[in-house]
Image (tube, helix red, strand yellow):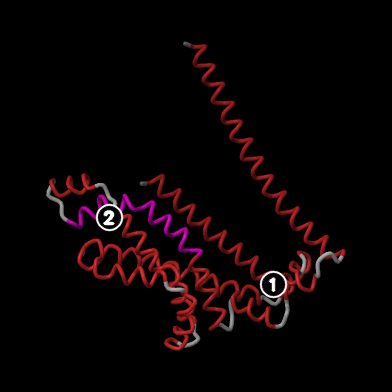
């Protein structure tokens, strides 16, 4: 018996070592791919294989960022886009949950609104941006609403689907024990739908960022979307590519924060 336990323990240790080695290899490989890409980009731009005026280069982008960091203009544009994205994301999350709860409470209302939600979700949201500018003006409110419009209808539909797939046996048990719809919502439906809510948040953060950038393309005087449009018009490709890279970093940061929230929820629920 002791030999069997020792063998099992050694197998567990070997397994953990293999898992650690696998994570190490994956991490190193990702870093090598990134630096290899940057090196090839810089090398081909310097020797003239690609036109550095059109494609820029990592060194030019770094110098551009440093110059805009010294006058703090890049932080202004980044903070504006980050603020608009986070606000639209929070509004989408809260509104979609509240509307889904309302639809769950009223089956008749959900049947009435279902075709409208489907149509609005399938509508190209970029077509709404010019209309929003006419209605609300070229303000931050318009950009935030544009960010919300990209994500909110799909979020409601996905959450409502999750609400409706709750185990009927658990709901019946709640009602049998004297509970009402509110108890069923708080004790069964919302805990069951928590993974769907987190999954929706992961999708919505990217969609809200897309909507905000669309709004900034059309109605902003500051923000990374405005910087991209301005840079494309005056052929400042360093600014344009730097803005795109900052958007990638922003999306990665926000997605990582939601992952942390997901891990916290798994530990406590």
- What residue do we see at 81% from left, 70% from top? 51
- The magenta span reads 181-206
Which one is in front, 188 or 71? 188
Question: 168 above or below 65?
Answer: above
Of labels 1 and 2, the one closer to you: 2
Q: Residues within 10 Å of mark 1 (few under 14, many from 20)?
A: few
The image quadrant that residue 157 belongs to is: bottom left
Which one is in front, 190 or 107? 107
- What residue do we see at 36% from left, 53% from top? 194
- Residue 74 in percent (x, y) is at 65, 74
Residue 189 painted magenta: yes
Which one is in front, 145 or 259? 145
Q: Regarding mark 2 in the picture, which secondary structure is present there?
A: helix
Q: Spatial distance from mark 1 to mark 2, Cα to Cα?
A: 50 Å
- Residue 265 in percent (x, y) is at 40, 49
| Secondary structure, magenta segment, majority class | helix
The label number, if any, that marks residue 49 in the structure image? none
Q: Which residue is mark 1?
A: 69
Q: Regarding mark 1 in the picture, which secondary structure is present there?
A: helix
- Residue 119 in percent (x, y) is at 36, 71
Relative to residue 265, is residue 244 drawn left or right?
right
Farthest residue, direction right: 47
- What residue do we see at 57% from left, 26% from top? 13
- Residue 10 in percent (x, y) is at 56, 21
Residue 136 painted magenta: no
Is tag 1's residue or tag 2's residue first in the polypeptide sequence?
Answer: 1
- What residue do we see at 42% from left, 73% from top? 123
Q: Which residue is mark 2?
A: 164
Q: Residues within 10 Å of mark 2 (few under 14, many from 20)?
A: few
The image quadrant that residue 158 belongs to is: bottom left
Relative to residue 101, is residue 195 drawn left or right?
right
Number of numbered discs on residues: 2
């Amino acid at each position: 018996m002791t030999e069997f336990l020792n063998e099992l323990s050694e197998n567990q240790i070997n397994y953990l070592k293999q898992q650690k080695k696998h994570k190490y290899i994956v991490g190193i490989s990702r870093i090598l791919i990134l630096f290899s890409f940057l090196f090839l980009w810089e090398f081909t731009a310097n020797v003239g294989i690609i036109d550095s005026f059109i494609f820029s280069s990592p060194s030019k982008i770094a110098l551009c960022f440093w110059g805009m960091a010294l006058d703090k203009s890049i932080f202004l544009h980044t903070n504006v886009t980050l603020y608009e994205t986070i606000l639209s994301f929070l509004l989408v999350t809260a509104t979609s949950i509240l509307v889904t709860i309302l639809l769950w409470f009223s089956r008749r209302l959900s049947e009435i609104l279902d075709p409208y939600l489907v149509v609005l979700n399938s509508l190209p949201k970029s077509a709404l941006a010019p209309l929003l500018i006419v209605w609300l003006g070229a303000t931050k409110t318009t950009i935030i609403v544009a960010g919300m419009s990209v994500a909110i209808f799909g979020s409601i539909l996905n959450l409502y689907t999750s609400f409706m797939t709750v185990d009927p046996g658990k709901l019946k048990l709640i009602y049998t024990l004297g509970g009402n719809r509110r108890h069923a919502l708080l004790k069964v439906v919302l805990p069951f739908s928590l993974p769907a809510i987190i999954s929706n948040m992961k999708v919505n953060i990217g969609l809200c960022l897309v909507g905000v950038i669309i709004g900034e393309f059309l109605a902003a005087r500051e923000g990374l979307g405005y910087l991209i449009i301005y840079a494309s018009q005056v052929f400042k490709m360093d600014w344009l590519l730097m803005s795109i890279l900052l958007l990638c970093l922003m999306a990665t940061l926000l997605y990582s924060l939601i992952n942390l929230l997901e891990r916290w929820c798994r530990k406590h629920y």
